[in-house]
Image (spheres, grey):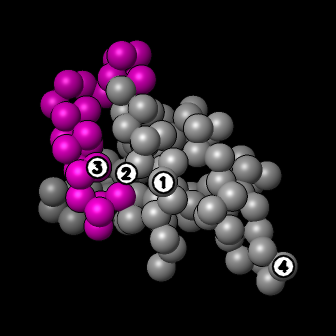
Amino acid sequence: ELAVEPGFKGSLRKAISEARKADKIDVRTAFKLQSMTFSPAFVQAAQNLAVTQIVLSGENAEQVPRTDTGAVNTAGINWDGLGKFLQLFLPILLDFLKGLGL
């Protein structure tokens, strides 16, 4: 389990707002996602899912620093620099919520 980095929540909220402004998600979906960011458990799960997606996809992998043992160093991730990724990540996050029945 990874600790939630302070920049992740803000960057996720910004990506939600930008996706809404660009009509990539509707108002209801944006509200649902923004509301969910008040839950520490949701933010933790969203960050874990985002890091997993970055690592497995190979895209933006250079944005994910590693420790000497190869583990992901979430403290070194520049979430502000991954705004476009986070916008593209929103459908995956929505599927995750649907899987939880939310």
| Residue 67 visible, this angle | yes
Element type at mark 1: helix
Q: Which residue is mark 4?
A: 68
Q: CA distance from mark 3 to mark 2?
A: 12 Å
Q: Amino acid at mark 4?
A: Asp
Q: Residues within 10 Å of mark 4 (few under 14, many from 20)?
A: few
- The nearer-to-camera label among 1 and 4 is 1
- Looking at the image, residue 86 sits to the left or right of residue 65; the answer is left
Q: CA distance from mark 4 to mark 2?
A: 30 Å
Q: CA distance from mark 3 to mark 4?
A: 32 Å
Q: Residue furthest front?
A: 6
- The boundaries of the magenta stretch are 18-43
Element type at mark 2: helix
Q: Nearer the viewer, residue 47 or 23?
A: 47
Residue 37 is marked as 3
Magenta run includes residue 72: no
- Looking at the image, residue 4 sits to the left or right of residue 45; the answer is right
**Residue drawn at (26%, 40%) of the image:** 34
Identify the mark nearer the N-term, 1 or 2: 1
Whole-percent x, y for residue 29 in the image: 22, 35
Q: Look at the image and tell me in which quarter the C terminus lies.
A: bottom left
- The nearer-to-camera label among 1 and 2 is 1
**Residue drawn at (33%, 23%) of the image:** 20
| Magenta span: chief secondary structure | helix
Identify the mark nearer the N-term, 3 or 2: 3
Q: CA distance from mark 1 to mark 3?
A: 12 Å
Q: Which residue is mark 2?
A: 93
Identify the mark nearer the N-term, 4 or 2: 4
Element type at mark 4: loop
